[in-house]
Image (tube, helix red, strand yellow):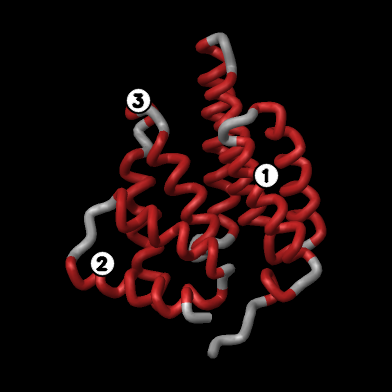
Amino acid sequence: MTSVPKAFASASDSSLTQARLLYYESLKDKTKLETAIALFTTIGQSDISLQGRAQTYIGSLTAVKAKFAFWPHQKLKWAKSGLHLMDAGLAQNPEDIEALFIHGTTCYYLPGFFGRGDDAQRHLREIVRLLPEQAYQYDPKLIANVIQFLLGKIKLTAEERAHLQMINLRLAKQ
């Protein structure tokens, strides 16, 4: 069995888990956005290995502010700012499955006029490539969520689909 990487074995593990939960709550509740951003900021500052991932989350949360903004120019401002932050965060560690997932899903749900559909597909396809080697280095619940999204939202070959399902089964047995 693969050893657990620093990102999940460190004291920041509980903070990262809490931040992830707050992230998903923030997607539906704008009152939680600033708290989630603050928590990811603290995580990125306290663990250099998580800076890129934390910044990707912060960028996504910033883009989510567009969803709750009233004025169109504010919506555009938040979305562009969030995309810039996400791009910079992902650039710090372009093979981080979690950062790729947050970036890819955020771009997936953006309106088409942002022109980020190709980014979404590219990042989600990259996850499919990386999962066989890296799946066991991440929180199994996170990977199960990633796999569920991939199986439901992107085109996969029969072989890729079977491989993802096998990874999912192995993680469930842990």
Residue that badge 2 annotates: 161
Left or right position of 109 against 18 = left
Left or right position of 58 against 63 = right
Q: Quadrant of residue 148?
A: bottom left
Residue 158, x across and y down, in percent: 18, 68
Tell me the tag on residue 115.
none
The Cα–Cα distance between marks 3 and 2, rounded to whole angstroms, is: 30 Å
Residue 3, x across and y down, in percent: 61, 86
> In the image, what residue occupies the spot 33% across and 70% down?
164
93 above or below 59? below
Left or right position of 80 against 147 = right
What secondary structure is marked by label 2? helix
Give the residue type at disc 1.
Answer: Leu
Q: Quadrant of residue 166?
A: bottom left
| Crowd tier of the residue under label 1, counting other residues whose Cα lies within 10 Å: few below 14, some 14–19, many 20 or above | some
Earlier residue among tags 3 and 2: 3
Give the residue type at disc 3.
Answer: Phe
Residue 8, x across and y down, in percent: 68, 71
Give the residue type at disc 2.
Answer: Arg
